[in-house]
Image (cartoon, rainbow, N blue to C red):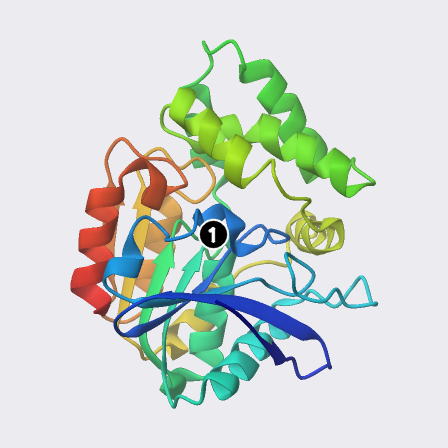
Amino acid sequence: MSESFQSSDGLTLRYDRIGAGPLLVCHPGGPGFSSRYFAGDLGGLDAFFTLVLLDPRGTGESERPSNPGAYSTDDYVADVEALRVALEVDQLSLLGHSHGGVVAAAYAAEHPTRVRRLVLANSLARLHPEEMERLKATHADEPWYEDAQQALEQELAGEFETEEELRQLAVREFAFYFADYDEAARAFLDEHVAAELPNTDALKWFNQRLEAGEFDLRPVLPRIQAPTLVVTGEADFICGPACASDLAEGIAGAEKLVVDDCGHFTYFEQPERWREAVRRFAA
C-alpha cells in the first residue's frame, strides 16, 4: 500500500509498505531512481520483514524539489528522519542499496541511537577506480562492451539533458552492473529500470561531487553504533569488494559478505544467499 509523509522542506514523499514481520526501511540508489528497481519484494525479503520501500525525493511518486541542488546527502538524511517520525518508531532497521547505502550510513552516523540494524548493500564510502577498471575489463570480449563504456563515460560526464536521454544511457551502461549480462539480466533492466525516467538533477549533483573529489564517507563511519552488515558482489564493478572493505573497516564490528558470481544487484542475481544473510542479520 502506498503512503506518504512530509519532508522537513515541505515535500510530499511516498513509500510502499509490503510484507509481514519486523519493519525494514529500504532506500534505493542512483541517485535519481525510485524503489521500482527493487522489483517489488527486494529478492523475497517481504517473507521476513514489513518492507518500507521509499521513493526518494524527486523519484517515483515523491515530489520533486524546485531547487535542482536540493539533493545533498544532508537532504536525503533529513528525509529518512522525517520518515522515522512519520512511522512513529524510536528506531529503524535500515537497508540502503548503492547510493541508498550512502544515505543509510550517513543517517546512522548523524542519528546513531535511531538505528537498530544497518544493512549496506552494494554501496560505497568512496570510489575505487582501479577496481572499477579491473572488473570492467573482465567483460572486454563482450559484444556490448564498447557501447556500455561509451554510455558510462557520457553519464559520468553529465552529457545528458533530458530524463529520456539519461534513461537510455543507464540501460546501455548497466550491462557492466551484472556478473553475467544474460537474458534474465536484460529482462530485469527492461522491467525495472527502463520503465521509469530517472531524476537528472539528483544524479548530476552527485556526479559533480565525485568529479570535484568531494565525496568520501570514511570520516563519519566511526560514529555509527548500529550493528552493520555490508554486502556486495565479487563482480560489482562500481561498489565491489574494495568498497565493502572501506565500509566494514570503518564501522566498528561490521560484518562483511562478498557474494560469488554476483554484480551490483545481489538481491536479483543471488536471491537465496541475499535473503538468508539479511534475514539472519536483521530479523
For the residue pair 50 and 96, the one nearer the viewer reads as: 50
| Residue at the disc numbered 1 | 98
Image quarter for residue 95?
bottom left
Left/right placement of residue 18 relative to residue 215 reads: left
Quarter of the rendering occupied by the C terminus: bottom left
Q: Is residue 241 visible?
A: no
Tag 1 secondary structure: loop
Q: Residue at x 64, y 43 (%)?
A: 196
Q: Is residue 261 above or below residue 126?
A: above
Q: Position of residue 153 (x, y in %)?
A: 67, 30
Which amino acid, mark 1?
A: Ser
Q: Residue furthest front?
A: 1
- Picture coordinates of residue 189, whole percent (x, y): 51, 33
The image position of residue 14, as x and y in percent, is: 59, 69
Residue at the image point whose x is 58% and y is 50% from the top:
30
Q: In the image, is residue 274 above or below residue 178?
A: below
- The answer to which of 263 and 192 lies nearer the viewer is 192
Instruction: Determine crowd level at label 1: few under 14, some 14-19, many 20+ residues with C-alpha closer than 10 A.
Output: many
* Numbered circles on residues, count: 1
Residue 180: quadrant of the picture: top left
Q: Is residue 67 above or below residue 155?
A: below
Give the x, y percent position of residue 131. 43, 35
State the residue at coordinates (80%, 61%).
68
Query: Residue 139's quadrant in the figure?
Result: top left
Q: Is residue 65 left or right of residue 194?
A: right
As drawn, is 265 to the left or to the right of 37? left
Task: Tell me if residue 197 can be seen.
Answer: yes
